[in-house]
Image (spheres, helix red, strand yellow):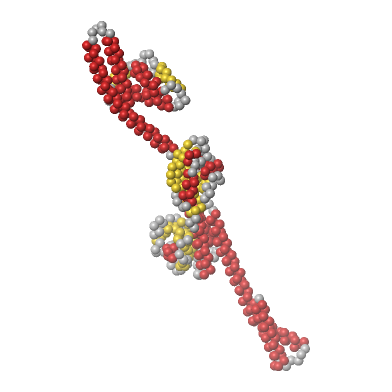
Amino acid sequence: MCRQAFQILFVLGLAELAATTVLDFIWQLPPGRLHLFLDVSLGIVLAGPYLYCLISREARLRKSSEAAALRRGRMQSALCDLAALALRDSSLEDLLDMALERLLAGGWLQADAGGRVFMPDAGRCRLVLKAWRGRGPAPRLGLELDAEASGCGLAMKSGRVEFWTGEASAGAGGRAHYCVPIKAGAGCLGVIQLYAGSGYRRDELDLIFLEAAGSLVGVILAHRHAEVERLRLGAAIGQSSDAVVVTDTQGIVGYVNPAFTRIIGRGREEALGREMRSVNPCREDDGSVYDRIFSAVGGGEAWNGRFSGKRKDGSDLEAALTVLPVRDASGNIINYVFVLRDSTDEVNMEAQMRQAQKLEAVGLLAGGIAHDFNNVLTTIIGYNYFISDGLEAGSPLRAFSQEIRRSAEVAASLSRQILSISRKQAAQLRVMDINTVIMDTAKMFRRLLGENVKLAMDTHPALWPIKIDSGQLEQVILNLIINARDAMPKGGEITLETA
């Protein structure tokens, strides 16, 4: 402004000097009102053209500056609108369509401008149309282009904004168009193709704006992809049958999945903000496990092992536990992830399996003893027959011989029962009365039950006889009675009824 004022004053001074020279030395006009009027008029005539040119140029510069400022303002507004899309919860296609709308809203590519968005397929050999804006018939979404033989492919490969004129490329119809790569970090997620109206010429400011817009759209898409991945990961963790708990480095719970409530018995609100030790405490004899866990993961190592804890209702919990450290981009540990799988049933099954193996070993031993015992009984019964045959009819020893035979037969029956339980004897089917079988083995059942459990018998007096292996029936009843005894640790009564 000062320079312009100095130029105006300088020109006016030169014009006044020239006018004075003409009036005083050429025309030799004497001083007076006429001299003053002619001096001022001649100075204005001499300085007028230059002043007019100067003022006109300043007006044009001001108008150009205002137009450029308005254009930059529209571009900044478009960039702000693009940045706001990152907060929209919309699908990928809707986000791309809205991004095109924001880019074309300013009219900087002239009134009949349009655009398309292409994204690469899985093999990155083809570009697939994902969004479209502009006049004319709408193209089919999913339209494919060769990534190696198009301007869009070149822009995607080079990572720079490309400007094409005078040729048809990717449906631009020979119109001038920009191919803007959608960049996210060092990669390229796609290409925005913007074709201008007739008469448009390349502009460096447009190139700068489009480069910024492409990077911003890349940030939006990367954010959307990350959000989709986060939701997918959250859904997967939510559907997991294993309990997943995320804590900070102090062991304070920040996240639990639904399986945590099912396994531990505590609601989400009962766990958040509390220490992991109190949310899922160890058994009293294993209280140092959390010290070992935090020591391992605090040093950057994963921890795997068995965990014995307590549910909310106080019941025991056996679990397979994996604890992993979570690092940030700088490599610092910021969280711990606990993955807990309930293995209580598996532990119980292992205990039952070990018990079954012990019982099997006892059965094998009992079977071997029963075989040897049968051999002894065979000898006793055989020799007893020899003694009975050698005694006279009225001998008092005959009664003792018969008692020996009955006792040996009872012992043989017990031996058969042991062999049947140990499964060392083939089935022997016979027609018999169930009541007789049960009454014969009742003494053995009572010895198994102990003193605090009573056995009551309620047999039907007129049962139909059936064909059965008595040893197998005795084994079934024996299993039922043992299970009933184990279900009454404080004692009780077991009723065995036939009907």
Image position of 464 (left or right of 220)? left
Residue pictured at 55% horizontal, 54% vertical: 87
Tell me the quarter of the image containing the C terminus: top left
Q: Nearer the viewer, residue 111 or 310?
A: 310
Asked whether the viewer can see residue 198, the reply is yes
Residue pictured at 74% horizontal, 91% vertical: 29
Residue pictured at 53% horizontal, 46% vertical: 253
> Is 236 drawn above or below residue 457 in the view shown?
below
Q: Nearer the viewer, residue 381 or 445?
A: 381
Residue 324 image point, x, y percent = 46, 49
Asked whether the viewer can see residue 97, the reply is no
Residue 315 image point, x, y percent = 49, 35
Residue 27 image point, x, y percent = 71, 92
Q: Quadrant of residue 122?
A: bottom left
Q: Quadrant of residue 83?
A: bottom right
Count of labels in the image: 0
Image position of 239 (left or right of 74)? left
Q: Nearer the viewer, residue 27 or 5?
A: 5
Tell me the quarter of the image containing the N terminus: bottom right
Residue 175 image point, x, y percent = 47, 66
Image position of 274 (left or right of 237)? right
> Is 220 drawn above or below residue 255 in the view shown?
below
Residue pictured at 54% horizontal, 65% vertical: 108
